[in-house]
Amino acid sequence: MHKIQRRFSNKDISEWFAGSILLAFPVAMTEEAWNLGKELPALSILLIAVLSLVFIAWFGYHRHYQSSLDTHSLEFVIRVFSGYAIALIVAAFVLALLNQFPLGSEPAVAIKRMVLVAAPASAAGTIVDSMK
């Protein structure tokens, strides 16, 4: 069992950014992701976001918190949501670099694309963060 970190440190943030970038770039560069961002209904996008959060929580629980969730539940929740937020930021940034993040003109499409790209990016960020 690994030592529980009480806060989301700068090292963790760096690991999440690095891991998220690993998969955000290739996914964001696909026309399929751009088209799905226009075509998928909001419910599907919401379920993808929930699935991403569930994966982060499940992986983090089994990797770090299995024996101590009762005493470190706040740290666990902070790690899950902070990690996903970082993946969303990375996804938005990469999509903006590719001129595929129309937040001003089509905010729903921009958000859908961001969630789609953040799904694999958050998984990669989770895995890189767990490599100690």
Image (spheres, rainbow, N blue to C red):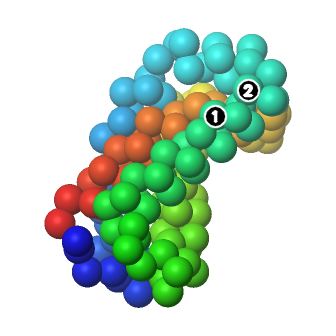
Q: Give the left or right position of residue 105, taking residue 55 as reference.
A: right
Q: Is residue 20 visible?
A: no
Image coordinates for residue 115, horizontal then vertical, percent: 62, 38
Q: Locate the C terminus by quadrant.
A: bottom left
Check disc 1 and report the residue beneath it.
Answer: 48
Q: Eyeballing the image, is 39 above or below 57?
A: above
Q: Amino acid at mark 2?
A: Ser
Residue 85, quarter of the rendered image:
bottom right
Q: Is residue 132 visible?
A: yes
* Residue at the farthest left position: 132
Query: Residue visible at 23% across and 71% down?
Result: 1
Check disc 2 and report the residue beneath it.
Answer: 44
Query: Residue visible at 47% across and 52% down?
Result: 58
Q: CA distance from mark 1 to mark 2?
A: 6 Å
Within-10-Å neighbours for mark 1: few <14, some 14–19, many 20+: some
Q: Give the left or right position of residue 37, taking residue 81 as reference.
A: right
Residue 13, quarter of the rendered image:
bottom left
Within-10-Å neighbours for mark 2: few <14, some 14–19, many 20+: few
Q: Give the left or right position of residue 83, taking residue 114 as reference.
A: left
Q: Secondary structure at mark 2?
A: helix
Of 95 and 47, which appears nearest the observer?
Answer: 47
Q: Secondary structure at mark 1?
A: helix
Q: Amino acid at mark 1?
A: Ile
Q: Eyeballing the image, is 20 above or below 132?
A: above
